[in-house]
Amino acid sequence: MGLKEQGMNEFALLDEKEGIPLFYPYIAPETKDELLETINSRWIGQGPKVDKFEQKFKEKLSSPNKFIATGSGTDSLHLAYILAGIKSGDEVITPVFTCTATNLPLLYEGAIPVFADIDAATMNIDCNDIEKRITSRTKAVVAVDYGGLSANYQKLTEITKKYNLTLISDSAQSIGSKFNNLNSCDYADFTAYSFQAIKTITTADGGMLSIKDHTLYEKAKRLRWFGIDRSLKQLGTWENDIYELGYKYQMNDISASLGLASLNHLEEIIEYRKNLMKIYLENINHPKIQLIGKEDFQGNNCPWLCTILVKENRFNLVKKLRQNGIESAQVHYRNDRYTIFGERRKDLPNMDLLEDQYLVLPLHHKVKQDDCKRICEVINEGW
């Protein structure tokens, strides 16, 4: 049951002066200087700051892949699907539980999302559910790192190699997370990142696409800009053809300025988030509460969300938290509940089990450690 059934006014968003909001954008102290430099320059659209942001992000991940910055994580995913050769009628196995941005771009291409069940311990795609959904029309597998929890990329790689499928990672929520000490882009053919307003770092809105096959890099840049080779166009005399359907998916230098400033603080942001998650892990001890990813968040994963499972009366807990000035919400929903994706699936037992249990708690740089402890105390009191 969603908020609509409970009454929207009762769960309206909190202002930070009223209590602890669920999300809050991180803006680095030097952002104003970066922005001032940009707006006083020749470039506010896609220019040198975008190039610099791409390179700096690549260096942070120590990756040999190619990277292009985009206008959103959704843009990055759409480009990944195109570059992967996904076409009308192709099937793509993808998790049922994710932001719709993961799966809507598949519909842009006329592809068919085939929803796989989730792992009950992590709410990521259940690798044991993938193989039985593979058919002769399957083109790719998409993994989502829910809340910052890395998917099982070892198993995903084994499956996709076995069936000669493309592996695409939606890492919108998992900047700073690793699986077996490797980044998602070290495994996946394509990896999409998001810098939307409330992500771990933000460019107000923006994304990044990691491309393992370097031969696709120039094509990716063309598709990002109307199908035009900008480097040739900027020579002054443009005699080029457009032979690919391109999009306006580029990042601009104003957005890149925010990203560059935030990247200076990425390690401390990750550490702070890990410390908050540690408080939740160590202090929530109500018998009706289970934390998603309890074991995994004690390793190399950077939490973006703290998700709990409430075994009974979830919305009574939401009300109690709200009465104590603490915002909470579901954030994401199973995608097969939306008409655009067709009929609701009946073969997703783990999703069915958790659908009415999960709840997201505040976890961001504005949440103080004492705030986090107080949230735990309110939960432990019962509801």
Image (cartoon, rainbow, N blue to C red):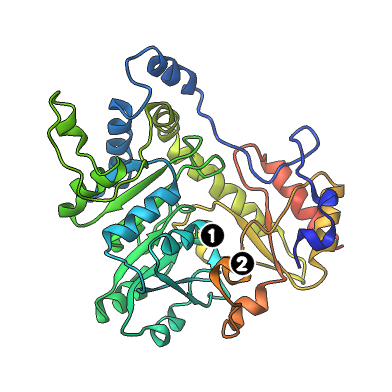
Q: Position of residue 158 (x, y in %)?
A: 30, 77
Tell me what residue is drawn at x 31 percent, y 84 percent. Answer: 136
Q: Position of residue 166 (x, y in %)?
A: 29, 69
User: For this rendering, which residue is in front, 382 or 146?
Assistant: 146
Three-letter residue code for mark 2: Tyr
Tell me what residue is drawn at x 54 percent, y 50 percent. Answer: 274
Tell me what residue is drawn at x 34 percent, y 41 percent. Answer: 69
Position above or below: 319 against 273: below
Of discs 1 and 2, which sits in the foreground? 2
Q: Farthest bottom residue?
A: 132
Question: What residue sits right under mark 2 in the picture?
Answer: 338
Three-letter residue code for mark 1: Thr
- Location of residue 367 by image quarter: top right
Position above or below: 149 against 222: below
Q: Is residue 213 left or right of residue 307?
A: left
Looking at the image, can residue 229 be seen?
yes
Q: Are marks 1 and 2 in contact (CB under 8 Å)?
A: yes
Position above or below: 237 against 267: above
